[in-house]
Image: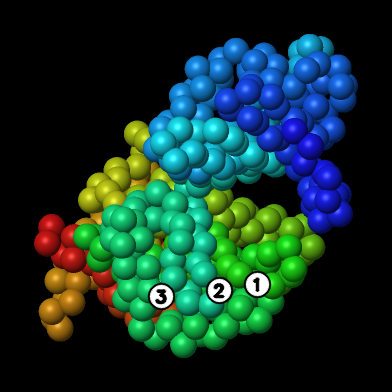
């Protein structure tokens, strides 16, 4: 058939060719078919290489698609419907092209199809792009389903929720299908602490205006009612023209990071406080040791011994698990061990686990150090048959509070009390002046021919945390 005999048809053929469209005209009664040059090319024929026919077209349809192609064509003819179908063409060199065809049947008065005209186009590039898009979408969903963070997408104009990843269920404690069924922004805001709404809404508006914004807000986890901190990275999503059509986000449960940061802040403050206290202790030790020393050598010996006592406290603190405290029996044990005192000469008895505040450690450690040093150098432990008894307990005070009671008693010392008093000046000063001043302690310090007898009564609220106070108070 000649479909280009008029000027109008010629212009139509040029337009179809420019658009990459092939045409056919099939006289069903005679079997004669006319193809445009583009029709030959799409099916892998050189123009004029074969006589156009239904069979010539079918020969190029991929073998796996032929049955379906015939069925769709026959159904359209029987139902007097428009023909539209996608199929693959297999070229002689093995190349596979994806094609889309659309056509119209014409019928005689008896209802028999007598003619069919149509267009066909090569959609291989479009089909490949669609395939890649589907794969990309599948990968995105796989990523979203595997992510421990919440991924979400909203329509930029309506803020209606379009996508929400499964991590939402775990973090928020609610089925994401509930939010997808009610995608309005207000439904999501119901899960957020009201005080955080205004700042969060302002950040969303900034994203709609084209900014990338990181927001932090709090939620109450449904079921557990636990407060969780969320860190939400929001960004605009643009179309090919650059218009913002969606906003997306990645929401991370930052609760642990916030708690760690808070703990770090507390630890830094505690470290600064301890450092200031430590420097004050070192300064005090140096001044007091200098005053009582008769020579540089004596100063060096005493000063290093006292610094070692301070260092032992720091060693105890550094070995503690987070949240734990040094106990009185640990502090005493470190001091006795540092002096190499044999267990047979010291009788130690008291409840374990009496926890001490870090602010009380240095002063108590120095007091124990001075008592121990004097006992070893001048007191009972300097004598062959001398002994030392150390008792402690937690007992109620007159005002109803509880206190740590320590009884330090030396037996069998053969030194003169006057000599002992001269050697123990700094320790006695710590016990009789510093402990009452810093820890509100009640103390007594007596020197006899047997050695030192010292008693300490330190209120628990000065050295213990509340939990420990209750536990030891019940003992």
Residue drawn 19% across the image and 71% down it: 402
User: What is the x, y in percent for residue 232?
Assistant: 53, 67
Q: How is the image coloured?
A: rainbow
On residue 71, which mark appears?
A: none
Percent across and percent down for residue 390 are 30, 52
Q: Are marks 3 and 2 in contact (CB under 8 Å)?
A: no
Q: Which residue is mark 3?
A: 185
Q: Nearer the viewer, residue 19 or 27?
A: 27
Residue that badge 1 annotates:
244
Vertical relation: 251 (above or below) 244: above
Quadrant in the picture for the C terminus: bottom left
Query: Can I make out residue 92 in this image?
Result: yes
Secondary structure of residue under mark 2: loop
Question: Is 380 or 64 nearer to us in this picture?
Answer: 64
Earlier sequence position, callout 3 versus callout 2: 2
Between marks 1 and 3 in the image, the one whose residue lies nearer the viewer: 1
Residue depicted at x 43% and y 82%? 196
* Image quarter hosting the N terminus: top right
Tell me the element at label 3: helix
First of labels 1, 3 by sequence position:
3
Q: Disc 2 or 1, which lies upstream in sequence? A: 2
**Residue 341 visible in this rendered orientation of the protein:** no
* Residue labelled with disc 2: 156
* Contact flag, marks 2 and 1 (Cβ < 8 Å): yes
Which residue corresponds to the image point at 61% horizontal and 78% vertical from the top-left? 208
Name the residue at the front extreme.
109
Q: Around disc 3, counting alpha carbons within 10 Å, would you say few (fewer than 14), some (14 to 19), or many (20 or more)?
A: some
Classify 9 as above or below 47.
below
């Amino acid at each position: 058939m000649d479909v280009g005999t008029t000027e109008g048809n010629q212009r139509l053929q040029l337009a179809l060719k420019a658009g990459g469209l092939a045409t056919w005209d099939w006289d069903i009664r005679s079997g004669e078919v006319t193809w445009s040059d583009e029709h030959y090319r799409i099916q892998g024929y050189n123009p004029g290489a074969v006589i156009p026919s239904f069979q010539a077209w079918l020969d190029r349809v991929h073998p796996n698609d032929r049955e379906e192609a015939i069925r769709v064509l026959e159904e359209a003819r029987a139902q007097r419907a428009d023909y539209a179908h996608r199929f693959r063409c297999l070229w002689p060199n093995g190349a596979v092209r994806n094609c889309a065809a659309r056509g119209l049947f014409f019928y005689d008065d008896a209802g028999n199809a007598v003619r069919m005209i149509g267009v066909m186009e090569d959609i291989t590039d479009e089909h490949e792009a669609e395939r890649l898009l589907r794969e990309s979408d599948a990968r995105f969903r796989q990523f979203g389903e595997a992510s421990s963070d919440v991924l979400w997408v909203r329509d930029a104009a309506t803020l209606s929720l379009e996508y929400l990843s499964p991590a939402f269920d775990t973090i928020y404690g609610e089925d994401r299908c509930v939010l997808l069924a009610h995608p309005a922004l207000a439904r999501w805001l119901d899960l957020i602490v009201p005080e955080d709404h205004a700042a969060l809404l302002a950040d969303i508006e900034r994203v709609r205006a084209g900014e990338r914004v990181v927001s932090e807000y709090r939620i109450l986890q449904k079921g557990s009612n636990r407060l969780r901190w969320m860190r939400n990275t929001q960004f605009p999503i643009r179309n090919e023209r650059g218009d913002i059509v969606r906003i997306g986000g990645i929401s991370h449960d930052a609760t642990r990071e916030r708690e760690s940061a808070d703990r770090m802040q507390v630890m830094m403050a505690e470290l600064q406080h301890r450092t200031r206290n430590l420097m004050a202790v070192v300064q005090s030790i140096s001044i007091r040791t200098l005053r009582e020393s008769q020579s540089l050598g004596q100063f060096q010996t005493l000063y290093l011994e006292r610094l070692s006592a301070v260092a032992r406290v720091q060693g105890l603190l550094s070995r503690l698990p987070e949240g734990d405290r040094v106990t009185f029996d640990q502090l005493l044990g470190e001091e006795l061990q540092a002096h190499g005192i044999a267990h047979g000469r010291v009788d130690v008895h008291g409840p374990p686990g009496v926890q001490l505040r870090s602010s009380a450690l240095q002063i108590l450690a120095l007091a124990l150090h001075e008592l121990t040093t004097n006992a070893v150098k001048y007191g009972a432990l300097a004598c062959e048959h001398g002994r030392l008894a150390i008792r402690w307990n937690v007992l109620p005070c007159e005002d109803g509070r509880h206190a740590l009671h320590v009884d330090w008693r030396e037996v069998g010392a053969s030194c003169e009390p006057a000599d002992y008093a001269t050697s123990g000046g700094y320790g006695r000063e710590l016990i009789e002046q510093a402990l009452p001043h810093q820890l509100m302690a009640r103390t007594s310090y007596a020197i006899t021919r047997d050695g030192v007898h010292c008693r300490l009564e330190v209120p628990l609220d000065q050295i213990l945390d509340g939990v420990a106070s209750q536990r030891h108070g019940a003992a």
